[in-house]
Image (cartoon, rainbow, N blue to C red):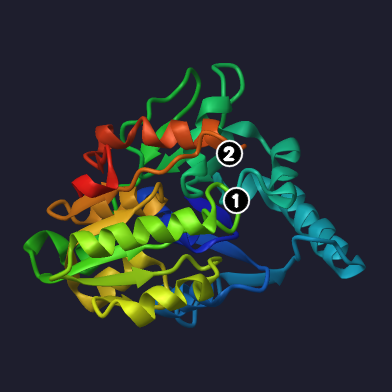
Amino acid sequence: MNGIFFIEAPFQLIGAIEAIRTYKLKKYIIYIRLSGNDKQLINLVQIFFPNDTNIRYFKLQNKQYSFYDCLIVIRTLLFILIYKYKFEYIFLGNFESKFLNLFTYILPRNKIVLLDDGIKTFSIQERFTDKHNYNMFTILYKMHPLSNQIIRYNKFEYLKSLYDVDNKTFSKVKKILFLGSKLSEIEIIEEKVYLEIIKAIIDKFPLYQIVYVPHREENIDKLNDLFLTHENLSLQIIDMPIEIYLLENRFSYYKILSFYSAALFSIKLLFQDIEVLSIPFDYSQSVYKDNINLVLKRLDEYEIKVLDDVRTV
């Protein structure tokens, strides 16, 4: 079997790492789109694909396409059109990308497989129908396929084997990991409210060190006052996806907290004995409320505890 991947984000590349083994690909090519904030992607390649000539990079900016960008699109589309019959699978990382969405118009539907793209996987599947859908490779093992749709589940079998996860080789440290979010940056909640939630968590666990890992698109300056006034809060900036960071450092945390990050699902799948908690917030006025609902109403299915109130953590 041969496959070609088009990747735009770190978690998509993690999906590609597993898909190569799950789909038993003998040959593959991975195209990675660079857009400026790419350190995690590059580090993943260095860890899992060192000196691999099957990795191809290209740059394509989000805000405006230059003439060079247009040439990249045309060249890539021509490559796919010419060689599409040599690939049994064509994996797309970001179904909502204007660039990658072009492929859905020129490629056989049965060859396309969508990789997880964070929590957007829920909303993408929700939009599909029995007559219009694409196959998927996802960590969301409770997601049921529609008619004429094939869903294969990413169980992180390769990563678990590589890092010997099932043999309990990881030390549990007495720390709480708080996965930051860009909720205030994209105006789902006000920054003031976001900081109040974090402070409530700090006050609830005064004897535990709380390690705050910011989202890669989050403005961490908003947290400066909290770091100065709370000794049990520390900042950890990582240059790889949180899943790989935990595996590389061979430890797990007492609790892992976040709002509605895809990492809640992936970490729970990787580390069955970690308590993973979703922090509630008021999103009733957000334009994203329907998509947020799709995620939150499914947390219990994946053994992720949903808190009624921050004070009940």
Q: Is residue 9 visible?
A: yes
Q: Is residue 17 visible?
A: no
In the image, taking residue 256 as reference, residue 187 lies left or right, namely right
In the image, taking residue 72 as reference, residue 185 lies left or right, namely left
**Please, what is the three-letter code of the amino acid marked with disc 2?**
Ser
Q: Residue drawn at (57%, 55%), measured in percent from left and top?
A: 4
**Please, what is the three-letter code of the amino acid marked with disc 1?**
Glu
Considering depth in this image, is 27 or 70 the residue closer to the camera? 70
Q: Residue drawn at (26%, 80%), measured in percent from left and top?
A: 231
Residue picked out by circle 2: 286
Q: Residue drawn at (37%, 78%), measured in percent from left and top?
A: 227
Considering depth in this image, is 233 or 174 the residue closer to the camera? 233
Are the two marked residues, 2 and 1, in contact with CB atoms closer than 8 angstroms? Answer: yes
**Can you give x and y, in whole percent of width and height, for residue 130 in the image?**
54, 17
Q: Is residue 220 above or below residue 112?
A: below
Labels in figure, total? 2
**Can you give x and y, in whole percent of width and height, for residue 203 in the image?**
23, 63
